[in-house]
Amino acid sequence: MNLRTPLANTRGLGSAKQGTEHFWHQRLTAVVLVPLTLWLTTSLFMLNASDHNTILTWINSPPNTVLLLVFIISAFYHGQLGVRVVIEDYIHSEWQKISCLILVNILVVLAGLVSVLAVLKIFLGI
């Protein structure tokens, strides 16, 4: 027999107070990615028939390097946020959910780091 009221049973089971922040981060990265994606696709379309040195020169330009780095960081973060929501919604076993979230975070950090380092390597001429 449970003597607790329905209100007492539900206290503490509400929002973790992070849903709104997560929502806004995803929307912010989406808004940032729209013009960056248009810039990148237009640039790559114009560089379609270019040789390797022309593309390296294009990446070496400071504005292009900065925009490319912002694109990479935003895209990986946005993707991580989206995959996290899918994992949290559709994986119900707690240990599988945590394992998948850890794996996704590791993969996103590694792939993002490799991408950023590749652009910086070209920019710095290493």
Image: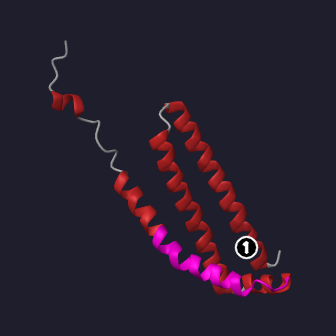
Left or right side of 59 for 11: left
Sort mark 1 into few (<14), some (14-19) or many (20+) by Cα contacts within 10 Å. Answer: some
Residue 99 in percent (x, y) is at 58, 37
Q: Amino acid at mark 1?
A: Leu
State yes or no: residue 35 in magenta. Answer: yes
Residue 33 in percent (x, y) is at 53, 72
Location of the N terminus by quadrant is top left
Q: Is residue 85 above or below residue 41?
A: above
Residue at image coords 55%, 55% = 80
Residue at image coords 68%, 61% = 113
Residue at image coords 42%, 66% = 27
Find the residue positioned furthest to the top. 1
Location of the C terminus by quadrant is bottom right
Residue nearest the observer in this picture, 75 or 16:
75
Residue 97 in percent (x, y) is at 52, 37
Which residue was labeled with disc 1?
120
Name the chief secondary structure element in magenta. Answer: helix
Point out the stretch of residues depicted in magenta. 30-51
Residue nearest the observer in this picture, 125 or 56:
56
